[in-house]
Image: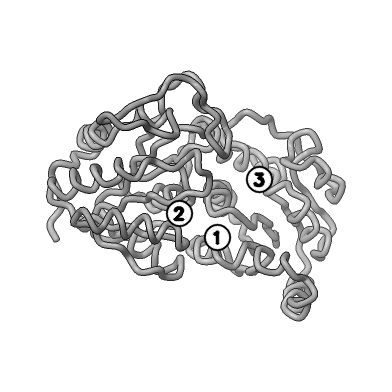
Amino acid sequence: MRVLLIKMSSLGDVIHALPAVSDAHARGIRFDWVVEEAFAAVPARHPGVDNVLPISWRRWRGDLLAHRFELGAFVKKLRSERYDLILDAQGLLKSSVVLALSRGTLKAGFSTATAREGAAAAFYNRRIPVAVGQHAIDRQRQLFAAALGYELDHNAAADYRIAMDVSPSNTCVLLHGTTWSSKRWPEDMWVELARLAAGAGYRVALPWGDEIERATAERIANVTEAEVWDRVPLSELAHRLEKSGLAIGVDSGLAHLSAALNVPTLVMYGSTDSALTGCRGSNVVIAQADFPCAPCLKRTCRYQGMPQYWRDQVISPACHSRLTPEGIWQLAQETFNADRVLPV
């Protein structure tokens, strides 16, 4: 069976689909995968993916006319193959348009009531209801099983199948960058966490994705022993990350990538809900803030209650006052024996 998978972005969403690809691959099914160009390195690692079709929608959408030749080349490549099944695992209008342009008889995706954008289901000739309110990985696995006609073993652990056999180092990566302001842990807390990790013998590393994150990383490094990594392609960043001995971060694509690479990973959740989109893996621990309005699922913090403090400073977002550096490092020690570092 030739299957085209459409799961374009974000990085976390792409990683959420990997266990479902592993389920199908175990049954002899192989995929071509349409994915945002920035994330193409992730599905390329999976043994069940034959071809990655990068799409540059995030770059093109600002000026489709200026990028018409690139867009035309993508559509030509997309339509050069005919598939037995085209599966839109994203459930958005933008992904359903790609599905509509693809060549194949059977086109499937989430039902109108369960897709992220219900109008996307109008482009499918098979609409699959998958209950909302479940973890994103579980929803993906159920969608694939129904679309591809196999029985899903709900007790089987999620298997990302992108980790390589590498020897971990004594590097502790602090994944401080994220998209929502409500998910950003206060900078002074990152400074203290970097000091705790360095004090335990770790080399502390700080990746970044944009200029704001770069400035944050440099400020943290200026007052600690941390190293700011150069900005590198995702393929190289994944290689660096999977050789790390420990990763601690907030809810972000890189935290999901770290979990999928089987790095010992501790992830902090405040405004977002780990029950719905939390990192999963055999080497993952979640710290969910115990706070009255958390998880609020808001991009910006709207807390208007009493100020919340850490070391006499007001903490914003307020829920992060429950996720102190001392508590996070203690959890890392208890879970991953983080006070006993690996040799260089």
Q: Which residue is mark 3?
A: 144
Q: Tag 2 or tag 1, which sits nearer the N-term?
A: 1
Crowd tier of the residue under label 1, counting other residues whose Cα lies within 10 Å: few below 14, some 14–19, many 20 or above: many
The image quadrant where one finds the C terminus is: bottom left
N-terminal of the two: label 1 or label 3? 1
Q: Describe residue 222's horizontal placement relative to residue 93 as left or right.
A: left
Could you tell which of marks 2 and 3 lies nearer the N-terminus?
3
Residue 65 position, x and y percent, is 80, 75
Colour pattern: one colour
- Does residue 5 lie above or below 312 as drawn? below
Q: CA distance from mark 2 to mark 3?
A: 16 Å
Residue type pointed to by label 2 = Arg
Task: Pinpoint residue 325: horizontal percent, then vertical percent.
Answer: 27, 36
What residue is at 37 percent from the left and 41 percent from the top?
186
Q: Quadrant of the N terminus?
A: bottom right
Task: Say which of 293 and 316 sits in front.
Answer: 316
Q: Residue at x 74, y 76 (%)?
A: 67
Amino acid carrying label 1: it is: Gly
- Secondary element type, mark 2: loop
- Please indicate whether residue 100 sits to the left or right of residue 333 in the image: right
Q: CA distance from mark 1 to mark 2?
A: 9 Å
Residue 187 in view, yes or no: yes
Callout 3: SS: helix
Q: Are marks 1 and 2 in contact (CB under 8 Å)?
A: yes
Q: Which label was assigned to residue 161?
A: 2
Q: In screen coordinates, is 227 left or right of 114?
A: left
- Please tell me the numbered disc located at residue 48: 1
| Image x and y of residue 80, in percent | 77, 75
**Dot 1: element:** loop
User: Would you identify the image quadrant in which residue 218 lies?
Assistant: bottom left
Crowding at label 3, few (<14), some or many (≥20) Cα neighbours within 10 Å? many
* Residue type of the residue flagged with mark 3: Phe
